[in-house]
Amino acid sequence: MRTLTGITPSGTLHIGNYFGAMRPAIDAQTRGDCFYFIADYHSMTTVTDSAERRKNTLGIALDWLACGLDPKTSVFWRQSDVPEVCELMWMLGSLAPMGLMERAHSYKDKTAKGLSPNFGLFAYPVLMAADILLYDTHRVPVGRDQKQHVEMTRDMAIKFNEAYGETFVVPESEIREEVAVIPGLDGQKMSKSYGNTIEIFGDEKALRKKIMGIVMDSRTPAEPKPDADKNLAIQLLKFFAPAEVAADFENRLRTGGLGYGDLKKALFEHYWNFFASARTRRAELAADMGYVETVLRDGADRARAVASVVSKRARKACGLE
Ligand code: ADP
Ligand code: TRP
């Protein structure tokens, strides 16, 4: 059973990414055979600055390693180090009906938001299908927004198998219903695109300012607040503090006597301590980028060992060899 997922290096990772995607992926390592990659080809549809891409790619590698990705257990690599994926994209794209491609929500959403469309953005789901099928993947843990892409991958795998004989494993998406949507500083879903994020790693002063700046209502500290469970700082505190500590804050807010300033201060402290050991580890790794490069190169070798077998199988099946 192989689990595979990719992370696009298009910005700085936030706590929504951590609880929604990274922690489940890191936990899955105890179940073995995990393939995780940094989708730098995918970032090309939106990022056009080469220095930024390099910086984001290495930054995300540091984030994952610091948060517990174990490069001995998991295969961890940079997508573009295995360029066979682009050849497979062509094979799959040649079987992808235009109707299927035109139904992709993420393309429609992005163009609706005013992002000027390019061919890469349109072809994005075919590259994603190639990412998944090139490694004989069974399970793809993703957020709900990516579910349709995995369904498109299944369609392409089935079409290829029908046209050229059994070649690809048909994968399943794994959407964790239990991972709540992490709210952002404004109470909406936390997302890079909404500018409402709390980064996993960053400057202490700036992050403290962000958290202390969360807007609350104008009720006085003494007033009881029967809706304490809906308070954003309480909701966030529950991710970082032990259950009994969070429950105590919630109670004090409900009965009255706890000021919002003190609550936000506590939220900051718990958040900051939660990532303390990962922060130390990240600083150590950042001082040894040679090691990080070695991890990614070694991961690429291990990924290529699988990819070359599957790629050969596909080339033979469709008559390229
Ligand atoms: P963003 O919305 O910030 O651009 P991405 O789309 O790059 O985030 O998401 C990367 C991963 O993190 C996906 O698996 C996604 O489901 C997860 N994720 C992002 N934001 C949240 C959130 N607020 N709550 C839970 N999971 C999230
Ligand atoms: N599209 C995914 C995202 O934006 C990233 C990704 C690229 C991916 N290739 C993948 C995820 C293959 C799972 C499998 O979050």
Image: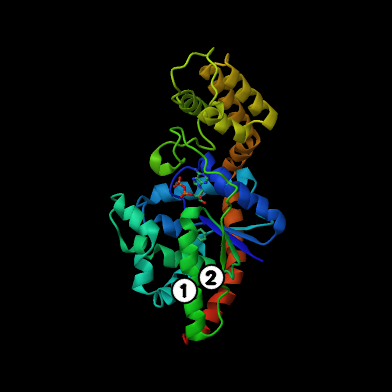
The residue tagged with tag 1: helix, strand or loop?
Answer: helix
Residue type for callout 1: Met
Foreground of the two, 289 or 162: 162
**In this rendering, position of residue 190 left or right of residue 265:** left
Task: For label 1, count other residues whose C-alpha is less than 10 Å away and answer few (under 14), some (14-19) or many (20+).
Answer: many
The residue at 41%/47% (across/down) is 52
Disc 2 packing (10 Å; few <14; some 14–19; many ≥20): many
Mark 2 and mark 1 in contact? Answer it, CB < 8 Å.
yes
Task: List the residue tagged with mark 2.
Answer: 133
Q: In which quarter of the image is residue 102?
A: bottom left
User: Between 257 and 60, which is closer to the camera in this rendering?
Assistant: 257
- Spot the residue most to the right: 30
Q: Where is residue 2 in the image (x, y as percent from the top left)?
A: 64, 65
186 over 297 or under it: above or below: above
Q: Quadrant of residue 275?
A: top right
The residue under label 1 is 156
Which tag, 2 or 1, sits closer to the chain's start? Answer: 2
- Is residue 62 in sight in this rendering? no
Q: Position of residue 162 (x, y in %)?
A: 50, 83
- Quadrant containing the N terminus is bottom right
Q: Is mark 2 on a helix, strand or loop?
A: helix
Q: Which of these two is toward me, 40 or 104?
A: 104
Q: Can you say whether 117 is above or below 311 in the image?
A: above
Q: Which residue occupies the foreground of this view, 53 or 217?
A: 217
Type of the residue with mark 2: Leu
Question: Is residue 42 among what the camera can see?
Answer: yes
Position of residue 293 measured from the top left corner of the image (x, y, whole percent): 56, 53
Judged by depth in the image, the label closer to the viewer, 2 or 1, is 1
State the residue at coordinates (43%, 59%): 41
Judge: label 2 CB < 8 Å from ligand 2.
no
> Would residue 209 appear left or right of 36 to someone viewing this image?
left
Instruction: State how many labels appear.
Output: 2
